Amino acid sequence: MLASNLHPSPITPTVDFDADGVQHGFLRLPFSRDDSAWGSVMIPIAVIKNGTGPTALLTGGNHGDEYEGPLALYELARTLQPDRVTGTVIIAPAMNYPAFRAASRTSPIDKGNLNRLFPGRPDGTVTEKIADYFQRYLLPRADIVLDYHSGGRTLDFLPFCAAHILPDKTQEARAFQAVEAFAAPYSVRMLEIDAIGMYDTAAEEMGKVFVTTELGGGGTARAETVRIARRGAMNLLIHAGIVAGEPDIKPTRWLDMPSDDCFAFAEEDGMIETMVDLGEPVGKGEVVARVHPIGRTGLAPREIRARMSGLLAARHFPGLVKAGDCVSVLAVEGEPVEP
């Protein structure tokens, strides 16, 4: 698994990925700092294995202010028993553990955004070392990868599961079938505005079935979105043939994100007024948000108009906005995937 031209990872797992049974341990990353000269970052990890079979890698906390994934995965790690498993389930509920502990999108140690630093470096920053370990040691083990996201403190989403439009249409079809099996209220064929350095891209370039989510936002989790996350993880494991049982399938509504026209951005600072609620229809040219100047009274708000027709899939969450912030994301109705 090691690339010959790279150093071994400094991370040491305290679990044996090849041993049957249930193991709860850590990915221990040495980190010398003022308050602990020989300290470590201890990233929680669980392995549930029973014989041979497919391997699922389930991750949350890629961004530390997104909570549906950690809530679902800490519980799954605690409750999933090996007699229900054929193969292996690797669970890392808080990938960027320093960011998770700080309740921030990026790491407080090095400001690293884990989901923009793949493939990482074994001799890089703390966050780059975490990315390198997942890139070279965990992703190669996986047949299917589920990485939970939500909007964090700055965005709010319709609750959806998604996979990406890919050059390899066979790989793409398998991913969209997994999305449908997750059975979120919405299922999205996603086109990223910047896929460079993403965990998603690293997994897809290895040919893995990769699915992700956006399950709400605002830096918290709702009862509904946590239920979606928990049900979806089990459905996905059943779909992959790793866990026995019948999936709990709920209706899903397919959406497409076909182009950059889905996204709208603020061009100045101010107070944002959302003119459309999540899930509501928007016509091309309609006002999706207004940005009110706050430095003085008497100034008219700047209108932000939709560049396409669709429905509102995501919106900026905090009341104040800065130039360059994403203020809205639109999606269009899509056809269900073929079985």
Image (spheres, rainbow, N blue to C red):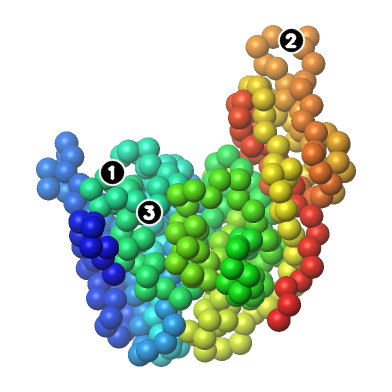
- Under mark 3, the amino acid is Pro
- Work out whether residue 299 can be spotted: yes
Of the numbered discs 1 and 3, the one sitting upstream in the chain is: 3
Choose mark 1 or mark 3, whichever is in front. 3
- Under mark 1, the amino acid is Thr
Task: Give how far across and how far down residue 147 sits, in percent.
Answer: 50, 62
Residue furthest to the left: 37
The secondary element bearing badge 1 is classed as: loop
Mark 2 highlights which residue? Answer: 297
The secondary element bearing badge 2 is classed as: loop
Of the numbered discs 2 and 3, the one sitting upstream in the chain is: 3
Position of the C terminus by quadrant = bottom right
The vertical placement of 159 against 296, above or below, is below
- Under mark 2, the amino acid is Thr
Q: Residue at x 65, y 57 (%)?
A: 190
**Is residue 300 found left or right of 266 in the rendered image?**
right
**Within-10-Å neighbours for mark 1: few <14, some 14–19, many 20+:** some
Which of the labelled discs sits on residue 125, or is there none?
1
Mark 3 highlights which residue? Answer: 119
Name which quarter of the figure residue 245 lies in: bottom right
Choose mark 2 or mark 3, whichever is in front. 3
Label 2–label 3 contact, CB within 8 A: no
Choose mark 2 or mark 1, whichever is in front. 1
Task: Give how far across and how far down residue 111 sits, in percent.
Answer: 37, 38
**Within-10-Å neighbours for mark 3: few <14, some 14–19, many 20+:** many
Q: Residue at x 49, y 57 (%)?
A: 201
Task: Give how far across and how far down residue 229 sits, in percent.
Answer: 57, 65
Q: CA distance from mark 2 to mark 3?
A: 48 Å
The secondary element bearing badge 3 is classed as: loop
The vertical placement of 146 against 177, above or below, is above
**Within-10-Å neighbours for mark 2: few <14, some 14–19, many 20+:** few
Q: Which of 330 and 48 lies nearest the eye of the viewer?
A: 330
